[in-house]
Image (spheres, helix red, strand yellow):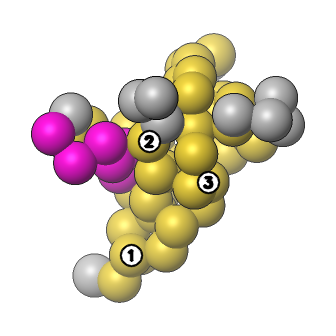
Amino acid sequence: MCESKVIAVKEGKEEVLVDKAVELRIEGDKVIIVDILGRVYVFPDLVLARVDFLQHRVYLVERR
């Protein structure tokens, strides 16, 4: 499987928000993540910073 970790970067520190994400959507000003179990996570205060396809990691940062 190709699940990804979703990580928030705040003040230089990384925090795993979702361990096995299978879907990422951006709807308006929200980042929406769905995990392998179908749970939906909504992050209105974070934005997509980068995606590391080799390491299966998605990095989010605080909205400026």
Q: Viewed as shown, does residue 32 lie left or right of 51?
A: right
Residue 4, labelled with which disc?
A: 2
Q: Camera-side residue: 52 or 1?
A: 1
Residue interval drawn in magenta: 54-59
For marks 1 and 3, give the CA distance.
12 Å
Crowding at dot 1, Cα within 10 Å, few <14 / some 14-19 / many 20+, comes out as: some
Circle 3 sits in a helix, a strand or a loop, which is it? strand
Amino acid tagged 3: Val
Which residue occupies 69% across, 34% down?
A: 36
Amino acid tagged 2: Ser
For marks 2 and 1, give the CA distance.
15 Å
> Is the C-beta separation of discs 3 and 2 under 8 Å?
no
Residue 23, labelled with which disc?
A: none
Circle 1 sits in a helix, a strand or a loop, which is it? strand
- Look at mark 3 in the image and give the residue it sits on: 18
Crowding at dot 3, Cα within 10 Å, few <14 / some 14-19 / many 20+, comes out as: many
Q: Earlier in the sequence, mark 3 or mark 2?
A: 2
- Image location of residue 28, percent across then percent down: 62, 17
Q: Viewed as shown, does residue 11 lie left or right of 63?
A: left
Quadrant of the rendered image containing residue 43: top right
For marks 3 and 2, give the CA distance.
8 Å
Q: Earlier in the sequence, mark 2 or mark 1?
A: 2
Which residue occupies 44% across, 41% down?
A: 4
Crowding at dot 2, Cα within 10 Å, few <14 / some 14-19 / many 20+, comes out as: many
Q: Camera-side residue: 17 or 4?
A: 4
Residue 14, labelled with which disc?
A: 1
